[in-house]
Amino acid sequence: MSQQIIIPVLIAFAITAVLGPVVIPILRRLKVGQTEREELKSHLKKEGTPTMGGLMILAGITITSVIYMGDYPAIMPILFVTVGYGIIGFLDDYLKVVLRRSDGLLPWQKMLGQILVTGVFIFYMVQYTDISSKMLIPFTGGFERGIYLDLGWLAIPVMFLAIIGTVNGANFTDGLDGLASSVTVLIATFFSVVAIGTGSGIEPITCAVVGALLGFLLFNVYPASVFMGDTGSLALGGFVASTAYMLQMPIFILIVAMIYWVELLSVMIQVTYFKKTGGKRIFRMAPIHHHFELGGWSETRVVAVFSIITAVLCLVGLMAL
């Protein structure tokens, strides 16, 4: 049991932890620095902190997964989505912080990349696995006795929306030191417990994500010496969404990854309301973690509260099984 659970955590943790003192100085020399919004006065001191630290996370996950892929082929589609979205994030980061193109990838370029990666994953799921598109409904009795939602042909467009929505929710969550890392390590732990309990064969990669994020948090907790950037946040969103589908649990994303979706919805609501009312706002700032910051919460308090909420929601998710 330790082979597919404990050792992947330790390998990924060691890789990411060792890479930190090597990669961070390189990123600093390359002047791959974060820029901050002027409204957030407390964040201005972070200007210039290296970003693209998601490369460390991806290295830990990828190397560990490759070690286990021969015996656990089910991890391959999850690794593909994780790395695929990580590459999209890397290109966006590279254009923004290295080539100094303020917008990074154009919106249509980013969306096209996300559709391609998601489309390949869905094609693989349909053609090369026996995993059904039916989705387990929470609180109906678990995998064996539970009720499954069958959307028929609608399952495909819903998969696109669910995966791309989750990825962008993870991206918006990455705005405070350690926030996306802390929230996602709890979600990855939840999926590891489920993967182990169901014998799904994906536990090496879910455990690798836990280890990689724990290693990254050594450098990402407040005050962060490196940020993950889109390289990391898009990859993590891809991991969460693809893992949920491999376990036939996409509905559970709304429970365990609720923070992602609250962050995403806060941005959508703010932008829509701003346009409809000619400049009025519902939140002090979006994504919603900045709303609480501008309301007087410290950065560490927001991270702690959002992480506690996620931990509780993961326990609710286990109860729902």
Image (cartoon, rainbow, N blue to C red):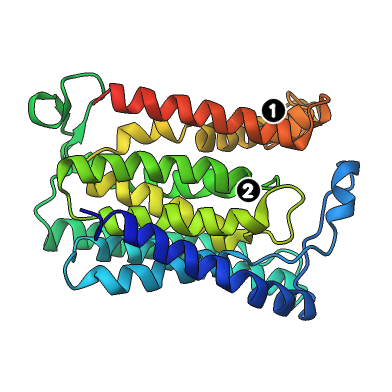
- The tag earlier along the polypeptide, 2 or 1, is 2
Left or right, 157 with reference to 72: right
In the displayed structure, 178 sits above or below 113; it is above
Q: Which residue is mark 1?
A: 273
- The residue under label 2 is which amino acid type? Asp
Answer left or right for 37 relative to 163. Answer: right
Give the quarter of the image for residue 73.
bottom left
Residue at figure coordinates x 18%, y 43% from the top left: 133
What whole-number distance in Å separates the C-alpha atoms at marks 2 and 1? 23 Å
Whether residue 91 is visible to the viewer of this picture, yes or no, is no
Q: Let me know if residue 264 appears in the view.
A: yes
Side of 85 relative to 55 (left or right): left
Q: Position of residue 20 (x, y in %)?
A: 63, 69
Give the label, 2 or 1, closer to the camera: 2
Q: Nearer the viewer, residue 306 or 285?
A: 306
Q: Quick one: SS at disc 2?
A: loop
Q: Which mark is residue 145?
A: none
* Residue projecting furthest to the front: 2
Helix, strand or loop status at disc 1: helix
Q: Residue at position x 61%, y 35% from top?
A: 268
Q: At label 1, which amino acid type do we have?
A: Tyr
Mark 2 packing: few (<14 Cα in 10 Å), some, or many (20+)? Answer: many
Q: Which mark is residue 174?
A: 2
Q: Position of residue 144 (x, y in %)?
A: 8, 30
In this view, the residue in front, 263 or 274, is 263
Q: Residues within 10 Å of mark 1 (few under 14, many from 20)?
A: some
Which residue corresponds to the image point at 89% horizontal and 47% vertical from the top-left? 38
